[in-house]
Amino acid sequence: MKILQIGASGVLGRAVAVALGRDAELVIASRSAEHPVDLTDPASIAALYESVGPVDAVVCTAGVTPFKPLEELTRADYLAGLTDKLLGQIELVRQGIAHVSDGGSFTLVSGVLAYDPIVTGAVAATVNGGLDSFVRAAAIELPRGQRINAVSATVFEQAWDAYGEYFPGHKPVDAAEAARAFVKSVRGRQTGQIYRAGY
């Protein structure tokens, strides 16, 4: 199985790369990887697919959203989150349909803030909710038996020291647990699922 993973340098990306790379040919793409890609640029995504050739699965663990108090958020902040994490992943699917094998899959990354928001998280909550809705809608239209799911995780144990204060009362999850949800999505048979990891 040949898997294209976008983003593998962060806490989640590294854990997913380890979990998926055990028994698959893993092709890593990011802004600085051997296969460069910028999720905000459709032409960059097109070039990525052309460079790696046909794949059996596309997995995304990348995407950036601004975190600011609601009263400080600007239209540009919302557009930044929508353009990167939301439309970037949608573009991976839109263009990827022609490059993913029959019965292949897409696994996107959303997050807990769509269901359990935090202060400063309005953009992320909006983007994650949109991603979850897109996954459910795309699942009933993808051609050739292709599947799509999302993994929605809470804050990671490995990042708790840096981000824990922003998630009062939340229980952190080990990134390896979220990685197992990516394995379930790629190796399983379900589609249109939002796998919640740690909440």
Image (spheres, grey):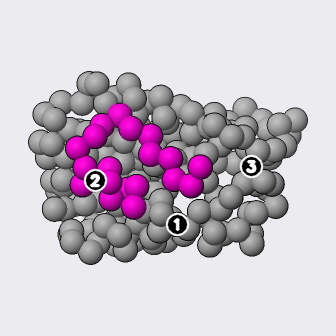
- In this view, the mark in front (3 or 1): 1
Q: CA distance from mark 3 to mark 2?
A: 30 Å
**Residue 74 image-quadrant placement:** top right
Residue 48 at what x, y percent from top left? 30, 56
Q: Horizontal and vertical percent for residue 69?
A: 84, 43
| Amino acid bearing label 1 | Ala
Q: Secondary structure at mark 3?
A: loop
| Image: 64 above or below 8 | above
Q: Nearer the viewer, residue 9 or 45?
A: 9
Taking the image as shown, residue 147 lies to the left or right of residue 109, namely left
Residue at far right of view = 71
Amino acid identity at mark 2: Val
Residue with the mark numbered 2:
186
Mark linked to residue 76: none
Sooner in the amino-acid sequence: mark 3 or mark 2: 3
Q: SS at mark 2?
A: helix
Residue type marked 3 = Phe
In the picture, the disc for residue 175 is 1
Q: Residue at x 19, y 62 (%)?
A: 2
Residues tagged 3 and 2 counted as in contact (Cβ below 8 A): no
Q: Is residue 123 above or below residue 138?
A: below
Q: Residue at x 33, y 59 (%)?
A: 183
Q: Magenta stretch?
A: 180-199
Of mark 2 and mark 1, the one earlier in the sequence is 1
The residue beneath circle 3 is 67
User: How far is the residue under mark 2 from the one under mark 1?
Assistant: 17 Å
Asked whether the residues under the numbered discs 3 and 1 touch, taking CB atoms below 8 Å apart as contact, a structural biologist would say: no
Residue 89 appears in the rendering: no
Q: Position of residue 92 (x, y in %)?
A: 36, 44
